[in-house]
Amino acid sequence: MPAIEIYTQPGCPYCIRAVRLLESKNVPFQEINAPRGTPEREQAYERSGGGTTVPQIFVDGRSLGGCDDLMRMERQGTLDSVLGLAA
């Protein structure tokens, strides 16, 4: 399984939506609390190449983007293979 990390902020509806999608896939992931102004938020910004919003999602260190990107991949049918679920 690939390593999945998601930087989130408490109360963020987009973060909640992205986390729920990952949970529905039954994949292990690390949720990193990254409220505005924290070192974790700065790390998400740097790792994503300048993404200023949360969530920021990474698979094996590669940025997938945010919630909209994750949902788009799900609609297109490509998310499972990225998460290591496709046969």
Image (cartoon, rainbow, N blue to C red):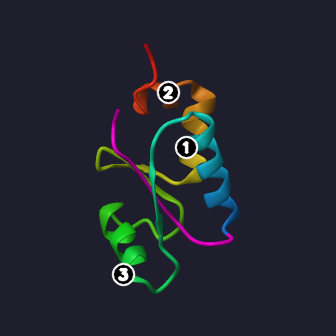
Q: Which residues are magenta?
A: 1-11
Q: CA distance from mark 1 to mark 2?
A: 11 Å
SS class, disc 2: helix
Badge 2 or badge 3: first in the primary sequence: 3
Q: Quadrant of residue 76?
A: top right
- Give amino acid for label 2: Asp
Per the rendering, the mark at residue 17 is none
Q: Residue at x 38, y 67 (%)?
A: 44
- Which of 26 and 52 lies nearest the eye of the viewer? 26
In the image, taking residue 73 as reference, residue 85 lies left or right, namely left
Q: Nearer the viewer, mark 1 or mark 2?
A: 2
Q: Residue at x 58, y 52 (%)?
A: 67
Provide the residue designation for mark 2. Answer: 80
Q: Is residue 8 magenta?
A: yes
In the image, taking residue 46 as reference, residue 13 lies left or right, namely right
Labelled pair 1, 3 in contact (Cβ < 8 Å): no
Provide the residue designation for mark 3. Answer: 39
- Give amino acid for label 1: Leu
